[in-house]
Each structure stands twice: as C-alpha cells, then as structure tokens.
Amino acid sequence: MPQLLHLIALLAIAVLPAQAADLTAAEYGFPLDNPFEATIATTPLELRAEVPSDDDIDQADYSLRLRPEREFTLPDNFWPVKRLGYRLARQSGPAPLIFILSGTGAHYSNGKTEALKRLFYGAGYHVVQLSSPTSYDFMAAASRYATPGLSQDDAKDLYRVMQAVRAQQHKLPVTEFHLVGYSLGALHAAFVSQLDETRHSFDFKRVLLLNPPVNLYTSISNLDKLVQTRVEGIDNHTTFYEVVLAKLTRYYRHKGYIDFDDAMLFDFQQSSLRLSDEQMAMLIGSVFRFAAADITFTSDLINRRGLIIPPKYPINEGTSLEPFFKRALLCNFDCYITEQLIPMWRAQYDGGSLAQMIQEVSLYALEDYLRQSSKIAVMHNADDLILGPGDIGFLRRTFGERLTLYPRGGHCGNLNYRVNTEQMLEFFRG
C-alpha cells in the first residue's frame, strides 16, 4: 500500500470524494475499482453492449493522396503510408455519419476505434474511422508539418482529411454529421468542432469528448512518470518485460491455449498471477513511451532535423532502423516538446514560453466556446490516470450538465461498458 500511495502522489492524481461523481460506484456497477486494471483489461465481455460482428458490417478501407511531395522525399520503406488510409462503414440507405478520432499514436483500426465503430454502426450510422495526427501514417501522409502536438494545427490537418473523405465519398447519402473522439482524439474533436463553426463543411449536430486531456502537458507528464515506477523483481539482470512475460507464460500454460485479448486480460487479472499495481503502471507507461518514440522518430525523419537520424543518412528498405528507434526511446515527451515542438512553434507562430504553448494546446484555449456550445458533451472518469488537480473542476465549470462523470473506469477502460454505450447513443439521438 505505501508503494501505491507513493505512485498516486507522484502522478499528482486528485482522488475525488464520492459526491464528486454523477453516480456512486454501487449505482454504476462497473466491476474494476483499480484504475490501472480498468485501463488495461477494460470491460468484462458479459457487461458489454451487443454490437454487430465485422461480418455484418458493410465496410471497406480507402486511401487519400494528400501530400504528394512526400512520395519523393520519404524513404522507400515508407511506401505503405505515402497515402493516408481510413475505414468507412456504410448503411444501405440515407443515414447520419459519425467521424471517430483515435487516441495517441493510434491507427484507424485501433481496438477502441473499432469498438466505437461497431456501436454506432449498429445504431444506424455511417462511420468513418480516422488515425490520430500523432500516428506515423497520418504524420507521413497528411500532416503539413509532421510535428504533432499543436492542437490547432492538428485539428486543421484532421479537418482537411475529413473534407477529402467527404469529397471521395460524395455519393454516400448523409443526413447529418456527428463527431466523437477518445483520449487525445477527444481533445482534437473539440478543436475540430470550433474550426467547423467558421468553415461550415459539416455543421456537426453533436460532438462527444470521451476521456479528453484537460491540460495536455499534465496528461502526458502523468503517463511519462509511469515508466519511472519502481517494480519489485526488476534489477540489472531482469527486465520488466521478462517479469511480465514469465507471468503470462505460466498463465497460458495453465489455461492450455493462447488468446491475447481484453477478455483474457480481465481473466488474467483475476488469477494468482495478476500484475501488481506497479507492474500495471509500468505497462501503461511503456506503451505510452513507445508512442512517444514513434512520434519523435517520424517527425525527425520527415523534417530532416538530425536529432535522431543524421539528415543525409541513406535509408532504404534494407536499412535497419533499430538503432535509431532505440535512440528515440530515450527521448520522452518532455524531450520531444523541448527539441522539436517548441522550436517549430516559436519559428512559425512567434511563440513564447512553454506555459503559453500549454495554454494554447489544451482545453483551456477553448473554454468560452465549450461553455457556450450546447452540442458538445464530455464523458470522463473520476479516477482517470491522465487527470491532474483542478481538471475535473474545470470540466464541471465549463460543461455543467453536459459532463457525465463516472466514479471509475481508469483511462478509457469503460468505453465498451453497456451503461456508457447506452448513454453515448442517447446523447447522439438527442
């Protein structure tokens, strides 16, 4: 217990009293009261909403040619992402269309994006799934500056992609447009919605933000710090991954088969081999660190900054990128912000301090718009790992009754819980 309390203090996560949540834990019924466990294992299968299977969905993948100049400047081994892919699930006749914006580093086929697709398709929507501006495919094929993190720029890139999708699918019978994003995608959805107020390409009827960061810098700092957690059994001779792999191997040997999915992770956490809080924190942090490394590597390569890869280093399909990716892994988000994001921001926008940039890229910058826009709502969790002191207070003051705050669920761990999904559909139906 002292180790867990130290970890919570390190993350500066404010533990809210019961009355701060819209529902008590008993009323809500979500079974996982550990935010790390909920983030990793998500919702048990029997507590999820019924949704159509992929075989029952009319869907296909498409691509857009948005940055043709990069077809000549990117290395040959980037050929799969020189065009931007997206996924469209279409209804048989006229229907509302909903765009789904993915979270940090996520491809449009990410598991959470897919789960939301099944939910909304089953409710009668056309669905378009988009990769995050922080994913390497989006950075290569759609981003103007390939240096994600400036929310207004990221939103403009997303908006151009959405307009291109609409132009490519001009025969799709759409009755109205909606927008939903989760995690970082929720922050992007807020900025995209504000942009649409002046450009009017979609005039979104409803916009839903699922588990958005409030202060973007606080959120990434919280996740970065998880990698620094002290884990029992790890020393100079035994890595964290070896400890986790050994546990999973023993678990699968006992089960007699391998099935690595959310349901397995929930079942695994009910076994005697369950991961400790410190191990789960390290696992979440490691996933985030790999996303940061991917952004750092890709941005440096596209912009030829020479921070990770020498600008004139020859790269082709046979070149091993492992040494450069290892170097990128040593650069956390603070490093990426300091070495790549802030210099670009200052050069292009005559920017000032880090504090000014944080203000501009976070929900704070949209406070007046979000307070006045009745079409935008937020669903969040009181125990979300990405929140810091004052964040929930900001959400309450800004959104009022348009904020639904669940007492538990970690970071996006309850997106497929049937209570949540029913309330999502209820919001979009008005």
Image (tube, rainbow, N blue to C red):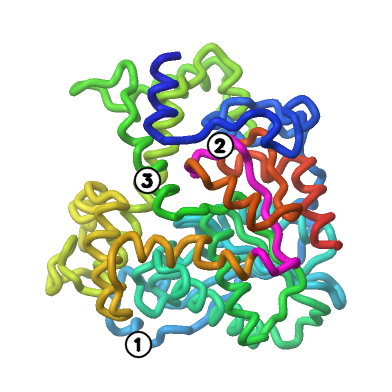
Comes first in the chain, label 3 or label 1: 1
Residue range (magenta)? 371-388
The reply to whether residue 312 is visible in this rendering is: yes
The CA span between labels 3 and 2 is 17 Å
Going by the picture, which residue comes out furthest to the top? 272
Which residue is pictured at 56% across the width and 53% down the height? 212
In this rendering, the answer to whether 387 lies above or below 371 is above
Which residue is pictured at 64% across the width and 65% down the height? 370
Q: Which quadrant, please, contains the N terminus?
A: top left
Residue ID for mark 2: 39
In the displayed structure image, the side of residue 234 where residue 104 appears, left or right: right
Check disc 2 and give the amino acid type: Thr
Q: Secondary structure at mark 1?
A: loop
Q: Quadrant of residue 243?
A: top left
Q: Secondary structure at mark 2?
A: helix
The CA span between labels 3 and 1 is 35 Å
